[in-house]
Amino acid sequence: MQIHDQVVLVTGGARGLGLAITQMLIAEGAKVVVNYHSSQHAADQLMTQHPNQVFAVQADITNKAQVERMFAEAKVHFGTAINSIVNNALVHFEFNGDARPKVEELSAETMTRQFDGAVLATLHTTQAGLADMKQAGFGRIVNIGTNLVQNPVVPYHDYTTAKAALLAFTRTLAHDLGQYGINVNMLSGGLLQSTDASKATPDFVFDLIATSTPLRRVTTPEEFAAAIMMFLSPYSRAVTGQNLIVDGGLVKG
Protein backbone atom coordinates (compact mmCIF):
# COMPACT_ATOMS: atom_id res chain seq x y z
CA MET A 1 0.00 0.00 0.00
CA GLN A 2 1.35 3.37 -0.99
CA ILE A 3 1.81 6.04 1.68
CA HIS A 4 -0.89 8.22 0.12
CA ASP A 5 -3.38 5.37 0.64
CA GLN A 6 -2.65 5.02 4.34
CA VAL A 7 -4.18 6.41 7.52
CA VAL A 8 -1.19 6.95 9.80
CA LEU A 9 -1.27 7.61 13.52
CA VAL A 10 1.62 9.71 14.80
CA THR A 11 1.76 9.83 18.58
CA GLY A 12 3.09 13.15 19.80
CA GLY A 13 2.51 14.34 16.24
CA ALA A 14 2.06 18.06 16.86
CA ARG A 15 5.53 19.06 18.04
CA GLY A 16 9.22 18.25 17.72
CA LEU A 17 10.09 15.17 15.72
CA GLY A 18 6.42 14.21 15.63
CA LEU A 19 5.59 17.44 13.80
CA ALA A 20 8.30 16.77 11.22
CA ILE A 21 6.85 13.28 10.67
CA THR A 22 3.33 14.66 10.35
CA GLN A 23 4.39 17.32 7.85
CA MET A 24 6.22 14.77 5.71
CA LEU A 25 3.22 12.44 5.72
CA ILE A 26 0.99 15.33 4.65
CA ALA A 27 3.39 16.05 1.78
CA GLU A 28 3.21 12.38 0.78
CA GLY A 29 -0.58 12.59 0.63
CA ALA A 30 -1.36 10.40 3.64
CA LYS A 31 -4.19 10.92 6.06
CA VAL A 32 -2.69 11.61 9.47
CA VAL A 33 -4.11 11.10 12.94
CA VAL A 34 -2.18 13.60 15.05
CA ASN A 35 -2.19 12.45 18.65
CA TYR A 36 -1.32 15.00 21.30
CA HIS A 37 -1.35 15.20 25.07
CA SER A 38 -1.01 18.91 25.83
CA SER A 39 -0.20 20.54 22.46
CA GLN A 40 -3.79 21.27 21.53
CA HIS A 41 -3.17 24.61 19.81
CA ALA A 42 -0.50 23.20 17.50
CA ALA A 43 -2.61 20.12 16.74
CA ASP A 44 -5.70 22.20 15.98
CA GLN A 45 -3.65 24.41 13.67
CA LEU A 46 -2.57 21.37 11.67
CA MET A 47 -6.17 20.24 11.32
CA THR A 48 -7.28 23.72 10.25
CA GLN A 49 -4.51 23.98 7.66
CA HIS A 50 -5.09 20.46 6.28
CA PRO A 51 -8.76 19.63 6.94
CA ASN A 52 -8.87 16.75 4.45
CA GLN A 53 -5.72 15.07 5.71
CA VAL A 54 -5.37 15.70 9.44
CA PHE A 55 -7.48 14.62 12.39
CA ALA A 56 -6.18 15.78 15.77
CA VAL A 57 -7.04 13.75 18.86
CA GLN A 58 -6.07 14.27 22.49
CA ALA A 59 -5.19 11.04 24.28
CA ASP A 60 -2.82 9.85 26.97
CA ILE A 61 -1.07 6.99 25.21
CA THR A 62 -0.32 5.29 28.52
CA ASN A 63 -4.09 4.97 29.06
CA LYS A 64 -5.55 2.04 27.14
CA ALA A 65 -9.13 3.33 27.16
CA GLN A 66 -8.09 6.69 25.76
CA VAL A 67 -6.06 5.04 23.01
CA GLU A 68 -9.02 2.82 22.05
CA ARG A 69 -11.25 5.90 21.90
CA MET A 70 -8.73 7.66 19.66
CA PHE A 71 -8.71 4.78 17.18
CA ALA A 72 -12.50 4.62 17.12
CA GLU A 73 -12.87 8.38 16.56
CA ALA A 74 -10.27 8.35 13.77
CA LYS A 75 -12.08 5.51 12.01
CA VAL A 76 -15.33 7.44 12.09
CA HIS A 77 -13.65 10.67 10.94
CA PHE A 78 -11.83 9.20 7.92
CA GLY A 79 -14.28 6.41 7.20
CA THR A 80 -11.47 3.90 7.30
CA ALA A 81 -9.28 2.46 10.04
CA ILE A 82 -5.77 3.44 11.03
CA ASN A 83 -3.45 1.05 9.21
CA SER A 84 -0.05 2.48 10.10
CA ILE A 85 1.33 3.64 13.45
CA VAL A 86 4.38 5.72 14.31
CA ASN A 87 5.03 5.38 18.04
CA ASN A 88 6.93 8.62 18.50
CA ALA A 89 5.66 10.32 21.67
CA LEU A 90 8.24 10.99 24.37
CA VAL A 91 6.86 11.21 27.87
CA HIS A 92 8.28 13.81 30.28
CA PHE A 93 11.90 13.86 29.16
CA GLU A 94 14.57 16.38 28.18
CA PHE A 95 18.04 15.68 26.85
CA ASN A 96 20.03 17.56 29.45
CA GLY A 97 23.01 15.54 30.63
CA ASP A 98 23.65 17.79 33.60
CA ALA A 99 20.12 17.32 34.92
CA ARG A 100 19.76 13.60 34.32
CA PRO A 101 19.03 11.47 37.38
CA LYS A 102 22.20 9.74 38.56
CA VAL A 103 21.97 6.06 39.37
CA GLU A 104 21.97 6.84 43.08
CA GLU A 105 18.86 8.96 42.59
CA LEU A 106 16.86 6.65 40.32
CA SER A 107 13.48 5.54 41.57
CA ALA A 108 11.01 2.93 40.46
CA GLU A 109 8.65 5.75 39.50
CA THR A 110 11.25 7.34 37.22
CA MET A 111 12.04 4.04 35.49
CA THR A 112 8.40 3.04 35.18
CA ARG A 113 7.39 6.41 33.69
CA GLN A 114 9.71 5.91 30.72
CA PHE A 115 8.80 2.23 30.33
CA ASP A 116 5.11 3.11 30.26
CA GLY A 117 5.69 5.89 27.73
CA ALA A 118 7.69 3.66 25.39
CA VAL A 119 6.62 0.02 25.77
CA LEU A 120 3.18 0.20 27.35
CA ALA A 121 2.08 2.93 24.94
CA THR A 122 3.23 0.82 21.98
CA LEU A 123 1.29 -2.13 23.35
CA HIS A 124 -1.84 0.04 23.58
CA THR A 125 -1.62 1.40 20.04
CA THR A 126 -0.79 -2.02 18.62
CA GLN A 127 -3.71 -3.68 20.37
CA ALA A 128 -6.11 -0.91 19.34
CA GLY A 129 -5.21 -1.23 15.67
CA LEU A 130 -4.65 -4.95 15.45
CA ALA A 131 -8.11 -6.20 14.50
CA ASP A 132 -8.45 -3.81 11.56
CA MET A 133 -4.89 -4.50 10.39
CA LYS A 134 -5.53 -8.24 10.48
CA GLN A 135 -8.73 -7.81 8.51
CA ALA A 136 -6.95 -5.71 5.89
CA GLY A 137 -3.94 -8.03 5.74
CA PHE A 138 -1.75 -4.95 6.01
CA GLY A 139 -0.14 -2.91 8.74
CA ARG A 140 2.96 -0.84 9.40
CA ILE A 141 4.22 -0.15 12.91
CA VAL A 142 7.28 2.06 13.30
CA ASN A 143 8.76 2.55 16.76
CA ILE A 144 11.17 5.36 17.56
CA GLY A 145 14.26 4.31 19.49
CA THR A 146 17.67 5.74 20.30
CA ASN A 147 21.29 5.08 19.37
CA LEU A 148 22.10 5.36 23.08
CA VAL A 149 21.19 1.67 23.37
CA GLN A 150 24.22 0.86 21.23
CA ASN A 151 26.33 3.79 22.40
CA PRO A 152 25.32 5.04 25.87
CA VAL A 153 27.64 8.03 25.93
CA VAL A 154 25.27 9.82 28.29
CA PRO A 155 23.74 7.45 30.86
CA TYR A 156 20.10 8.42 30.61
CA HIS A 157 19.28 5.27 32.56
CA ASP A 158 15.50 5.51 32.49
CA TYR A 159 15.14 6.62 28.88
CA THR A 160 17.73 4.26 27.37
CA THR A 161 16.51 1.23 29.31
CA ALA A 162 12.95 1.84 28.16
CA LYS A 163 14.06 2.16 24.54
CA ALA A 164 16.09 -1.06 24.82
CA ALA A 165 12.95 -2.80 26.01
CA LEU A 166 11.06 -1.27 23.09
CA LEU A 167 13.62 -2.70 20.69
CA ALA A 168 13.02 -6.18 22.12
CA PHE A 169 9.26 -5.63 21.89
CA THR A 170 9.66 -4.48 18.27
CA ARG A 171 11.32 -7.76 17.39
CA THR A 172 8.88 -10.00 19.23
CA LEU A 173 5.97 -8.12 17.64
CA ALA A 174 7.52 -8.51 14.20
CA HIS A 175 7.78 -12.28 14.72
CA ASP A 176 4.23 -12.52 16.01
CA LEU A 177 2.45 -10.23 13.54
CA GLY A 178 4.26 -10.94 10.28
CA GLN A 179 1.79 -13.71 9.48
CA TYR A 180 -0.94 -11.06 9.17
CA GLY A 181 0.96 -8.81 6.77
CA ILE A 182 2.00 -6.42 9.54
CA ASN A 183 5.57 -5.14 9.51
CA VAL A 184 7.13 -3.81 12.71
CA ASN A 185 10.41 -1.91 12.69
CA MET A 186 12.37 0.62 14.72
CA LEU A 187 14.29 3.72 13.76
CA SER A 188 16.84 4.90 16.29
CA GLY A 189 18.20 8.41 16.21
CA GLY A 190 20.86 10.35 17.94
CA LEU A 191 20.38 13.83 19.29
CA LEU A 192 18.32 15.80 16.77
CA GLN A 193 18.82 19.49 16.11
CA SER A 194 16.48 20.67 17.31
CA THR A 195 13.35 19.46 19.07
CA ASP A 196 11.55 20.37 22.27
CA ALA A 197 13.35 17.51 24.00
CA SER A 198 16.80 18.71 22.88
CA LYS A 199 16.36 22.44 23.49
CA ALA A 200 18.10 22.09 26.86
CA THR A 201 21.18 20.57 25.24
CA PRO A 202 24.20 22.95 25.18
CA ASP A 203 25.49 24.04 21.77
CA PHE A 204 28.92 22.50 22.37
CA VAL A 205 27.31 19.05 22.54
CA PHE A 206 25.84 19.51 19.06
CA ASP A 207 29.24 20.70 17.82
CA LEU A 208 30.91 17.62 19.28
CA ILE A 209 28.40 15.30 17.63
CA ALA A 210 28.83 17.03 14.29
CA THR A 211 32.61 16.64 14.30
CA SER A 212 32.28 12.96 15.27
CA THR A 213 29.80 12.13 12.50
CA PRO A 214 30.88 11.09 8.98
CA LEU A 215 28.42 13.61 7.49
CA ARG A 216 29.95 16.32 9.73
CA ARG A 217 26.55 17.59 10.86
CA VAL A 218 23.79 16.78 13.30
CA THR A 219 20.72 15.00 11.92
CA THR A 220 17.60 17.15 11.64
CA PRO A 221 14.06 16.03 12.51
CA GLU A 222 13.19 16.32 8.82
CA GLU A 223 16.01 13.97 7.82
CA PHE A 224 14.95 11.46 10.46
CA ALA A 225 11.31 11.71 9.34
CA ALA A 226 12.34 11.01 5.74
CA ALA A 227 13.81 7.65 6.78
CA ILE A 228 10.49 6.72 8.39
CA MET A 229 8.80 7.06 5.01
CA MET A 230 10.86 4.16 3.72
CA PHE A 231 9.43 1.86 6.39
CA LEU A 232 5.88 2.95 5.57
CA SER A 233 6.33 2.54 1.81
CA PRO A 234 6.03 -0.63 -0.30
CA TYR A 235 9.81 -0.59 -0.73
CA SER A 236 10.15 -2.10 2.75
CA ARG A 237 7.48 -4.78 2.43
CA ALA A 238 10.05 -7.53 3.09
CA VAL A 239 11.66 -5.68 6.01
CA THR A 240 10.49 -6.38 9.55
CA GLY A 241 12.00 -6.72 13.00
CA GLN A 242 14.83 -4.34 12.10
CA ASN A 243 16.43 -1.39 13.86
CA LEU A 244 17.79 1.27 11.53
CA ILE A 245 20.09 3.82 13.15
CA VAL A 246 19.55 7.25 11.59
CA ASP A 247 22.26 9.53 12.96
CA GLY A 248 24.50 10.40 10.03
CA GLY A 249 26.72 7.37 10.60
CA LEU A 250 27.79 8.22 14.14
CA VAL A 251 26.89 4.81 15.57
CA LYS A 252 27.35 1.60 13.60
CA GLY A 253 25.06 -1.41 13.98
Image: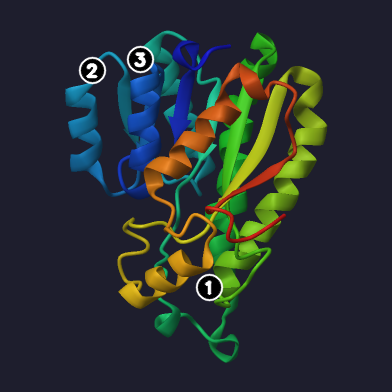
Residue 110: assigned label: 1
Which is nearer the N-term, disc 1 or disc 3? 3
Which is nearer the N-term, disc 1 or disc 2? 2
Viewer-proximal residue among 183 and 180: 183
The 10 Å Cα crowd at callout 3, few under 14, some 14 to 19, many 20 or more, is: few
Q: Give the residue drawn at x 81%, y 21%.
A: 179
Secondary structure under badge 3?
A: helix
Q: Quadrant of residue 210?
A: bottom left
As displayed, is residue 70 above or below residue 212?
above
Amino acid type at mark 2: Pro
Q: Quadrant of residue 157?
A: bottom right
Amino acid type at mark 1: Thr
Whole-angstrom CA distance, mark 1 to mark 2, is 38 Å
Whole-angstrom CA distance, mark 1 to mark 3, is 36 Å
Residue carrying label 2: 51
Secondary structure under badge 2?
A: loop
Residue 64 horizontal/vertical position (percent): 53, 41
Q: In which quarter of the image is residue 153?
A: bottom right
Amino acid type at mark 3: His
Q: Give the residue drawn at x 25%, y 36%.
A: 43
Residue carrying label 3: 77
